[in-house]
Amino acid sequence: MFKGSMPALVTPFRNGALDLECLKKLVEWHIGEGTNGFVPVGTTGESPTLSHEEHETVIDTVVKATAGRVPVIAGAGSNNTVEAIRFVQFAEKVGADAALVVTPYYNKPTQRGLIAHFTALHDCADIPIIIYNIPGRSVIDMTPATMAELAKLPRIVGVKDATGDLARVCDTRMACGSDFIQLSGEDATAHGFNAQGGVGCISVTANAVPGLLAKMQAACLAGDYATALEIQDKVMPLHKAIFTEPGLVGAKYAMSRLGLCSDEVRLPLTSLSDETKAMVDAALVHAGVM
């Protein structure tokens, strides 16, 4: 169920408030472009600056707009286990297909603490959980050995791996088994991630070019890495441009240039510099979408 190109959806704003009509339109557009699933209210969805009520509203809106056509993996992470339980249970209640749970950030739990945290979330609901391992943001790196312990639980089904370490894909497969779902969390290395055994990408860049990245992921899943590499070459400048500043800001700017949504973000994030805007514009042209 969880494979291919799955955008880490941006949360559109208008004058500081959620723009839910725009969000619904984005869901329709993505499905028409071949997107294989949605991940609302991750970091790219500006989860750090959404209220709990806004967080839940976005999840509910995406689930309803998607109407079962593709899977929805609801962002449900927190460094507070009680808060994460609330989000996982809400995701289950409104019909999300899974929950994406980041390793707790800032308070730096041990590997033993990670096992306790994810076990509590596993036990609190009956939907699958995807571990989100991103040590660059959370400081904590969940080791393959820890992941293997969690993979023994029936509803811990996979990982969004944003380590950028392609050898980790092999290490995780050896530790957790070939059925454990591995999704890339880093756009620039997603092609290589799949070659190592991954089955998809939870993508920031796919917010702007979902059709191209859906085709790239489909080619990888079909074993046609030559075609996938041709597409990768088209989008690589866009990956780099979008991540020159915080990725969600770059993604929203690219989307604004394509007439999809406003580039409005919430503080402490700010709009792109003129220099980065020029990079994104050039990359959109290179990708053939502008």
Image: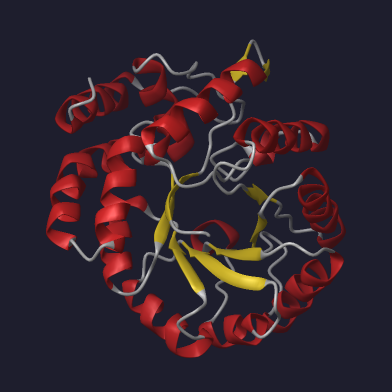
Which quadrant: the C terminus?
top left
Expressed as whole percent of the image width and height from the top left, the position of residue 79 reads: 74, 58
Closer to the camera in the image, 70 or 162: 70
* Coloring applied to the structure: secondary structure
- In the rendered view, does 186 fall on the left or right side of 64? left
Q: How many marks?
A: 0
Closer to the camera in the image, 69 or 2: 69
Residue 246 visible here: no
Expressed as whole percent of the image width and height from the top left, the position of residue 96 reads: 70, 48
Expressed as whole percent of the image width and height from the top left, the position of residue 95 reads: 75, 47
Quarter residue 139 falls in: bottom right
Give the residue at x 50% y 16%. Answer: 262
- In the rendered view, does 188 fall on the left or right side of 41? left
Closer to the camera in the image, 159 or 139: 159
- In the rendered view, does 39 fall on the left or right side of 164? right
Give the residue at x 79% y 66%. Answer: 121
Expressed as whole percent of the image width and height from the top left, the position of residue 200 reads: 40, 59
Give the residue at x 56% y 88%. Answer: 145
- In the rendered view, does 87 fall on the left or right side of 18? right
In the depicted structure, whether residue 256 falls above or below residue 57: above
In the depicted structure, whether residue 32 falls above or below residue 17: below
Give the residue at x 45% y 47%. Answer: 36
Residue 23 visible here: yes
